[in-house]
């Protein structure tokens, strides 16, 4: 058994309201994107109020940001956010940085060698023999996949503690000279942020003293799917000026069509029936994606209230977003989770792929 002990969060310094971003988009894309005026309603339909960025809005109105400049901004900002989120998760778990045996860092919006996990270990003063795994390229699915990989490590080594960090700077992938609809849609949706999770193995749990800020969820298992012939549904184009987003308009339809089966197969692996899961922590890829989850799985608006809240307050930060939803659910004093109740976490990513995890209140 592995236990999720805590979640820590960190946002970058520039908070911008959706209306201000809409005005930026109106000015930038006006006269350059067909039917731009009619498309402006996407900023309202996105159901986002605020987002956080690693640079001020004026930065995005400048035309000559090289790949190196973008990547340098990613590294410095991602490291700062990763350390802040990790410190919060460590404090909430009631442990110290030197108690961590394994670090997983998930990120897809920039590149670094030495990788961010090495930088986090150094910055937080962790042990020189801390094991580490950098994971790149999972996009929005990285939060659930990273949680699963970290938990599986502590299942294999039950006397160990793992730290997961997910961090993205989606905003720096904005391409000034790309006046396509996909780049326009991205301006209405994506944002930056980081999240961290502490997970302990069963033997280590027995030696940890109680801590008032600790939340406990037992990790049961995971379920990964790579859908056939879907490589162009979601991902990056690599340009001279950086990473350019790929996402197909068919994504919500795929969610509505496929996710009930995915969830049911995860449950069946653990001898559970559809409906046995009482709580859902799903990545808010956008309003249409959440609506597709509701349609496909058969959920009500209130079943995904934390996903809707995070979307409205933070937008889509890619991999950390689902962990923001988890933290919101765990920290809500009005949320009642009984011991033994099941939680399904889910997110979608490039490939096109699905990552699910099953947890249980303990």
Image (cartoon, grey):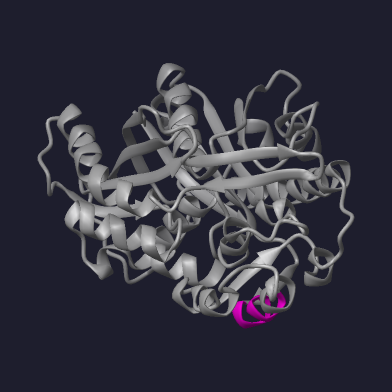
Can you say which quadrant of the picture contains the N terminus? Answer: top left
Q: Position of residue 344 (x, y in %)?
A: 29, 46
Query: Quarter-wise, where is residue 122 in the image?
Result: top right
Q: Is residue 336 magenta?
A: no
Residue 20 part of the magenta segment: yes
Residue 127 picture location, percent across and down: 73, 25
Res 207 visible? no
Of residues 57 and 22, the one drawn nearer to the viewer in this rendering: 22
Foreground residue among 12 and 348: 348
Q: Quadrant of the C terminus?
A: top left
Q: Is residue 64 left or right of residue 314?
A: right
Q: Nearer the viewer, residue 144 or 224?
A: 224
Judge whether 272 appears above or below 278 on screen.
above
Task: Please give left or right for residue 257 compared with residue 13 in the image.
Answer: left
Give the side of residue 259 with respect to residue 102, left or right: left
Q: Main structural element of the magenta stretch: helix, strand or loop?
A: helix
| Residue 242 appears in the figure | yes
Q: Residue at x 73, y 78 (%)?
A: 27
> Magenta part of the protein: which range?
18-24
- At 80% from the left and 26% from the top, the residue drawn is 114
In percent of width and height, residue 132 lies at: 64, 24
In the displayed structure, 216 sits above or below 24; it is above
Q: Identify which residue, 128 or 116, lies in the foreground.
A: 116
Q: Position of residue 274 (x, y in %)?
A: 12, 44
């Amino acid at each position: 058994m592995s236990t999720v002990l805590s979640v820590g969060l960190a946002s970058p310094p520039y908070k911008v309201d959706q209306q201000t971003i809409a005005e930026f988009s109106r000015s930038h894309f006006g006269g350059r994107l067909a039917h731009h005026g009619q498309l402006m309603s996407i900023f309202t339909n996105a159901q986002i109020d605020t987002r956080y960025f690693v640079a001020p809005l004026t930065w995005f109105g400048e035309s000559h940001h090289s790949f190196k400049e973008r990547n340098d901004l990613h590294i410095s900002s991602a490291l700062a956010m990763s350390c802040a989120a990790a410190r919060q998760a460590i404090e909430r778990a009631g442990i110290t940085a030197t108690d961590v045996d394994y670090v997983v860092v998930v990120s897809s919006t920039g590149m670094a060698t030495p990788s961010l996990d090495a930088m986090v270990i150094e910055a937080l003063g962790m042990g020189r023999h801390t094991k580490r795994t950098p994971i790149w390229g999972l996009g929005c699915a990285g939060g659930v996949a990273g949680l699963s990989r970290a938990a599986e490590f502590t299942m294999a080594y039950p006397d160990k503690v793992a730290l997961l960090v997910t961090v993205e700077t989606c905003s720096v992938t904005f391409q000034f000279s790309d006046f396509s609809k996909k780049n326009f849609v991205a301006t209405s949706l994506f944002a930056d942020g980081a999240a961290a999770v502490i997970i302990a193995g069963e033997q280590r749990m027995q030696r940890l003293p109680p801590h008032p800020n600790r939340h406990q969820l037992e990790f049961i298992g995971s379920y990964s799917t790579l859908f056939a012939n879907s490589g162009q549904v979601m991902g990056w184009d690599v340009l001279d000026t950086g990473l350019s987003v790929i996402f197909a308009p068919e994504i919500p339809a795929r969610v509505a069509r496929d996710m009930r089966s995915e969830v049911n197969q995860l449950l069946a692996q653990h001898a559970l029936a559809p409906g046995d899961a009482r709580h859902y922590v799903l990545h808010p890829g956008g309003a249409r994606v959440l609506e597709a989850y509701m349609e496909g799985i058969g959920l009500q608006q209130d079943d995904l209230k934390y996903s809707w809240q995070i979307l409205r307050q933070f937008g889509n930060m890619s991999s950390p977003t689902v962990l923001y939803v988890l933290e919101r659910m765990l920290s809500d004093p009005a949320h009642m989770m009984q011991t033994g109740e099941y939680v399904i976490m889910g997110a979608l990513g490039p490939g096109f792929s699905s990552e699910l995890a099953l947890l249980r209140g303990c």
